[in-house]
């Protein structure tokens, strides 16, 4: 009896292993970074995809944000990249992206729903490629610690308030409640340039070439540098590190040390999770200047990589992930503003979001419609990170006191020109 | 009886080991004799050096050649074949300066700020490192209570990763860190250590010394323990003052070890990157930007990864380190001759 049972088990095991061999699995790798919980959400969704498609297995390599901008480009240049990657420097890595168009069942769906953002992923001169889709659309904008304003008895400036109005209000609040950071802005050229465009910066000349230094840009630089001398901003963020090193103030905001924090919509999920009931926080519309009341658009895209050996399988994964139903689940659970026009029109349900998070998502959703054309142009420019880094590095030196604004302007221009020339060699 | 039984049980094992060893030697001996017949006895030492030379060549010499090659190319491509030859253009960019003492007058101002900061960092870090290592070694060489414990305590930071060291100290030094909590509890004001250039450089040097001092202390301690005790006994019998013992016996006999410590710490200081990068990020501004951080950022942190310029800077750094090594060799030779 025992022998018969053992024999049956052996035959079953053999059959199973043969079946496994018969369904040969295509192995794919996806490089992914997370700001909030989107890593967990995408893992769940990929497991569902694998259950429906047993012939494909996707391994997700979760990496820090820094690795996406610094390590991944070297991997891609060496031809050792993954099959898919979630990237933010869309122009910078566009030359390594695979055009999925020949492998897609319905390219029209992609053009219809991701059209305006596909431009950001294409190499200069290419008008047709479909390299991927936006996992999220982001907009930069301010968060306010409403509880601190209430404790200080200072009213929130209105929707059309200027940066000066916010600076005065935030300083009053910080002085009254002893908060160390009246205004904190992420140490990022991307964040700053939205403000600069609001102050009237054009960034490009009539031919579409970078022409960063103009009156609007200078006004924004002088405003921010002035805030550092008047105590509206602390040097701890912009002045404490060198070069274009990113430094966020999300931890300071979560610890209720900041009255107004200029960052962006990607922070909502982590604020919702970590702040909880500690204090009330709200997203407010981007302050206005002579040029606009705009933030910078942006976001992360999941793109296919040219060196993949399995483009067909990659296209199947991407088609599944970019489908309206799956994206609705992804954006809803990760608390993201969708980068899918159909979903944007219908609206996304955020079942797990608190009322504060839902309100913030609503504010950022409205901000999308107010983004200035100059901001879109900058985001779509292939070498935009050269501009972001040059601006941050040189303005950071002014804030730290080791350079003057006039020298910074000259350096920004020469840094941009030198790096673009090097890139074109 | 038990001893006799142990002896009996050890013998066969020992015999087996020795038999295996002999077999192994014979196995190596046969091909070696063939090689010796082929290349001659005089060249056999090179045969034994070959494995090490091969590893050295592959992992040090080949990358060095590639680095120099990169430094004479431009563009942002990764593969050498796709990079245009630009001659000494990258070196020209590095040395294009109105005045080397004023980084703002240089095309690559960050490089020269890095050079200046590295010089300041190296001077103070090495001086203090040698001094504190020597003092610590002298104290730990004395017959004090808990000497073993203190030796372990001073050596412990050497075992930590530089990133861990920097994160620990960052936690201590930040606005709401341990040190500021202590200062405010004593009625003082918080100090923003990473906003003030002088404080930032001070802590970069301090943390680096804290992290590495144990290693150099160990070298000096070994040197102190090698000094014959009878010299001290003779000095004691002559009632020689302690300071004279230090200057006339300890330091002269410790000189070879001090030289090793000096040169090793000098080379290590010039190469410093990780702990200062994590601790201060090179800031405030570029007050603690060291030359290796400049190389890293030029090569990897920008959208245009300028491997050519970064390689040129690393070749310059390599030349500096080569000169330092030559000085070490010359001093060691002089010390031996003396």
Image (tube, grey):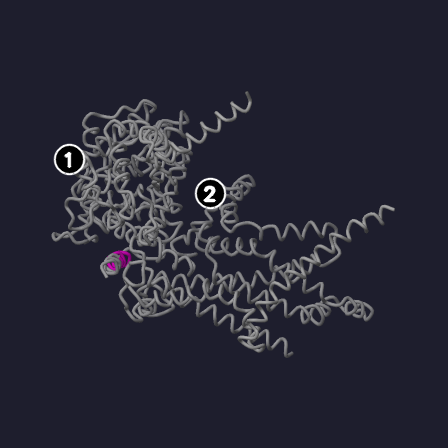
- In the displayed structure image, the side of residue B222 where residue B179 appears, left or right: left
Label 1 marks which chain's residue? A
Residue B275 picture location, percent across and down = 48, 52
Q: Quadrant of residue B286?
A: bottom left
Q: Residue furthest right?
A: B1
Label 2 marks which chain's residue? B
Q: Which residue is mark 2?
A: B175
Q: Please report the bounds of the magenta region as a residue range.
A: A407-415
Residue A281 magenta:
no
Q: Which residue is mark 1?
A: A108
Quarter holding the N terminus of chain A?
A: top right
Residue A221 visible from this viewpoint: no
Q: Are marks 1 and 2 on the same chain?
A: no
Residue B273 visible from this viewpoint: yes
Residue A132 picture location, percent across and down = 24, 40
- In the displayed structure image, the side of residue B243 where residue A149 appears, left or right: left
């Amino acid at each position: 009896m025992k022998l018969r049972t053992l024999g049956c088990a052996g035959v079953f095991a053999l059959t199973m292993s043969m079946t496994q061999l018969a369904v040969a699995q295509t192995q794919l790798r996806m490089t992914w970074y997370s700001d909030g919980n989107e890593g967990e959400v995408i893992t769940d969704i990929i497991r569902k995809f694998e259950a429906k498609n047993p012939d494909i297995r996707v391994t997700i390599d979760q990496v820090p944000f820094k690795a996406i901008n610094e390590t991944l480009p070297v991997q891609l240049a060496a031809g050792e990249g993954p099959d898919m990657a979630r990237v933010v420097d869309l122009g910078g890595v566009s030359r390594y992206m695979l055009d999925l168009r020949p492998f897609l069942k319905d390219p029209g769906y992609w053009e219809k729903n991701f059209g305006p953002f596909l431009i950001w992923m294409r190499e200069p001169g290419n008008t047709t490629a479909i390299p991927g889709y936006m996992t999220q659309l982001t907009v930069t904008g301010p968060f306010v610690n409403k509880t601190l304003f209430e404790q200080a008895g200072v009213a929130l400036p209105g929707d059309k308030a200027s940066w000066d109005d916010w600076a005065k209000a935030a300083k009053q609040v910080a002085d009254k409640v002893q908060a160390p950071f009246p205004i904190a802005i992420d140490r990022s050229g991307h964040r700053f340039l939205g403000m600069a465009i609001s102050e009237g910066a054009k960034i490009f000349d009539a031919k579409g070439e970078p022409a960063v230094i103009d009156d609007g840009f200078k006004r924004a630089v002088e405003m921010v540098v002035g805030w550092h001398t008047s105590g509206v901003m602390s040097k701890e963020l912009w002045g404490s590190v060198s070069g274009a090193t990113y430094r966020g103030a999300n931890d300071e905001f979560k610890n209720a040390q900041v009255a107004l924090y200029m960052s962006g919509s990607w922070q909502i999920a982590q604020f919702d999770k970590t702040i909880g009931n500690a204090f009330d926080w709200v997203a407010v519309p981007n302050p206005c200047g002579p040029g606009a009341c705009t933030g910078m658009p942006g976001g992360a895209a999941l793109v296919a990589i040219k060196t993949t050996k399995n483009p067909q399988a990659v296209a199947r994964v991407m088609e599944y992930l970019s489908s309206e139903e799956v994206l609705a689940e992804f954006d809803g659970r990760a608390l993201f503003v969708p980068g899918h026009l159909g979903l944007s029109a219908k609206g996304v349900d955020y079942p797990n979001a608190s009322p504060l998070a839902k309100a913030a998502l609503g504010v950022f959703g409205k901000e999308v419609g107010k983004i200035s054309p100059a901001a879109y142009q900058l985001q779509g420019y292939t070498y935009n990170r050269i501009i972001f880094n040059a601006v941050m590095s040189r303005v950071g030196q002014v804030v730290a006191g080791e350079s003057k604004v006039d020298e910074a302007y000259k350096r920004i221009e020469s840094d941009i020109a030198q790096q673009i020339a090097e890139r074109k060699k | 009886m038990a001893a006799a039984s142990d002896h009996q049980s050890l013998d066969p094992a020992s015999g087996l080991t020795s038999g295996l060893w002999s077999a192994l030697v014979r196995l190596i001996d046969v091909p070696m004799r063939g090689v010796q017949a082929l290349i001659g006895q005089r060249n056999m030492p090179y045969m034994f050096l070959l494995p090490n030379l091969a590893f050295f060549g592959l992992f040090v010499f080949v990358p060095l050649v590639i680095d120099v090659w990169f430094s004479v190319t431009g563009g942002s491509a990764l593969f050498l074949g796709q990079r245009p030859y630009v001659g000494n253009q990258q070196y020209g960019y590095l040395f294009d300066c109105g005045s080397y003492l004023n980084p703002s007058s240089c095309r690559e101002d960050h490089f020269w700020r890095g050079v200046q900061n590295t010089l300041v960092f190296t001077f103070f870090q090495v001086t203090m490192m040698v001094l504190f290592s020597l003092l610590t070694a002298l104290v730990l060489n004395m017959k004090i209570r808990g000497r073993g414990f203190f030796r372990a305590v001073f050596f412990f930071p050497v075992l930590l990763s530089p990133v861990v060291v920097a994160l620990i100290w960052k936690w201590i030094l930040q606005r709401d860190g341990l040190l500021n909590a202590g200062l405010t509890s004593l009625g003082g004001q918080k100090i923003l250590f990473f906003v003030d250039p002088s404080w930032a450089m001070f802590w970069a040097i301090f943390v680096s010394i804290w992290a590495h001092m144990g290693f150099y202390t160990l070298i000096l301690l070994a040197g102190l323990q090698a000094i014959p005790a009878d010299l001290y006994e003779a000095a004691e019998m002559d009632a020689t003052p302690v300071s004279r013992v230090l200057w006339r016996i300890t330091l002269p006999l410790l000189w070879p070890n001090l030289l090793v410590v000096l040169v090793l710490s000098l080379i290590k200081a010039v190469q410093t990157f990780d702990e200062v990068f994590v601790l201060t990020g090179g800031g405030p501004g570029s007050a603690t930007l060291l030359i290796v951080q400049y190389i890293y950022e030029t090569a990897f942190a920008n959208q245009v990864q300028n491997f050519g310029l970064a390689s040129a800077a690393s070749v310059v750094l390599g030349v500096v380190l080569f000169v330092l090594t030559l000085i070490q060799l010359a001093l060691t030779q002089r010390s031996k001759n003396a």
